[in-house]
Amino acid sequence: MDNRTSSDQVDAVVVGAGFAGMYMLYRLRQDGFSVCVFERGSDVGGTWYWNRYPGARCDVESMEYSFKFSEELQQDWEWTERYATQPEILSYAEHVAERFDLRSGISFDTTVTSAVFDDQTLSWSVQTMGPIGVAKEVHAQFLIMATGCLSSTNEPAFDGLDEFQGATYHTGDWPHDRVDFADKTVGVVGTGSSGVQSIPVIAEQCRHLTVFQRTPNFTIPAHNRPLDPTEQAEIKANYHQLREANEAMTSGFGSRYPRNEISSLSVSAEEAETILEQRWADGGLSFLGAFNDLMLSEEANVVAADFVRRKLRSIVRDPTVAELLSPTQVIGCKRLCVDSGYWETFNRENVTLVDISSEPITFTSAGIKVGDVVRELDTVVFATGFDAMTGALTSAGIVGRGTQPLTKTWEAGPVNYLGLGVHGFPNLFMITGPGSPSVLTNMITAIQQHVEWIADAMNHLRQHGLTVIEPQAEAQRQWVAHVNGIADFTLFPSCNSWYLGANVPGKPRVFMPLPGYPDYKAKCNQVASNGYEGFDLE
Ligand code: N01
């Protein structure tokens, strides 16, 4: 509870103390609102608090994956590598909390068990379960969900798992103590970003590693390196330029490698190869900016996809293994991975790749069974991802007007307006919710834009003597159609990705993030300057 608040009635409850919750708390305090933040972890950091698996690091460059709201902060903080490790990003989050006295406003080890809108008092009743099982209720005018897009782990119900005698870990809920893989036979299930980052590190530490792959993924080398202090000083001298460039990016792959505004089909095969070689040498997500139509045309996309498949075949020595690792989907359709020696790992003597695309794995007491073969394992790492974008929202027990649960409103997919609010749920805000660019941008850029928009909206209500803001049904309907229309214009819906909820059995298949951050930001600004059009203000 914010130490400036003496009662259980506050202006705003914020759920989550990752980067979104921390900045929301900072900003609302600046504006004189009373705030209470609840965080289920024991400290700040969100994603970077939970994802402590070996090899975890950010796939956005560290100089860009940081807050811009404080000039002193961005000048003082020194990053050590091009792509920061999880421990370094967590230290940064801890530093921000310390520097701006944020921990005093956060209740840690506290889970929000329900949040119910009261039609009479027009406020939210938020029930929490704190340390040692202490339940508490707080009332708030606003409920702000800063629960993150990739925070609710996907733990498939594998047959026989209860019988397995070995140790199991999920990359998204990794223990704080070091996991010792020495002399162990280890299995990793899942080959998305978490698998691609952890597999090379685990392979170096364990006796034998078996990778269970359902779908091969495209990955681009990170070419990580220490940050040169001169380079860092040059960026800091003009930090605002880098931040402005970030705001203009249509996707999150880094403003230092802008997208080439040409089609891969408009250049000769030799020219395309030269451009792709340069992007491969630059490394990271910016590979997708080699051409401007990679996510719009299959014909254009295959030029880049074939280039990466050739690279794969040149790296992996065993042609059968290379074939199994070779992705067949559109490149970029699933979130592109960024690696440090992923494909090279399959040249190691102690690594085996097992294809599980045609039948699910089952567990025995000794290990994992695929077909008739049981692979004996001491330890299994689940790199099976998240109930992305909606999982943390639908599991928070949110109930809106007329006792309608959010789970019911979202039965067929996460309908919303601007990815910020939901009709029937007054004064509820989501930071980087479905229907906003979120995971298709630099997350910190998207978080800052949402926090500032929400704080401005709350100030607007206060200044005009209003108490309630709620998306109109028609504005919401149009927004959902707009997001679906843009997604259908791209190649994103063409494969099974977590963007579509396809990784979670039974989840409605809806493309959740909105491509195109600058247009989205302009739309949000326009809505605000037109008196919050599309929202009912009471
Ligand atoms: O999760 P994923 P992730 N049986 O969903 C497989 C961000 N992130 O944690 O593709 C067998 O991508 C699943 O197979 P399939 C980043 O945005 C960023 O790796 O569904 N396998 C897939 O291979 C990323 O995209 C960083 O067929 C099963 C894997 O598990 C997002 O988080 C680092 C299965 C899950 O891959 C999620 O990444 C890490 C089953 N029943 C994460 N269910 C950075 O670099 C799932 N799989 C910043």
Image (cartoon, helix red, strand yellow):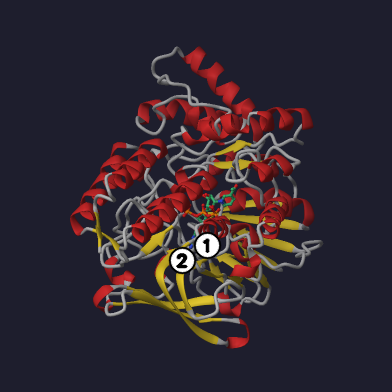
Residue 440: x, y in percent? 45, 43
Q: Amino acid at mark 2?
A: Ala
The picture quadrant where one finds residue 488 is top left
Identify residue for label 2: 392
Q: Amino acid at mark 1?
A: Ser
Residue 117: x, y in percent? 33, 75
Residue 277 seen by the camera: yes
Q: Secondary structure at mark 2?
A: helix
Identify residue for label 1: 151
- Quadrant holding the C terminus: bottom left
- Quadrant holding the N terminus: bottom right
The picture quadrant where one finds residue 37 is bottom right
Residue 350: x, y in percent? 74, 51
355 relative position to 415: left or right:
right
Tag 1–tag 2 contact (CB < 8 Å):
yes
Residue 377 seen by the camera: no
> Dot 1, how many residues are within 10 Å of its Cα: few (below 14), some (14-19), or many (20+)?
many
What's the CA distance linking mark 1 and mark 2?
6 Å
Residue found at x 39% / y 26%: 300
Residue 191: x, y in percent? 56, 51
The answer to which of 180 and 418 lies nearer the viewer is 418
Residue found at x 77% / y 51%: 204
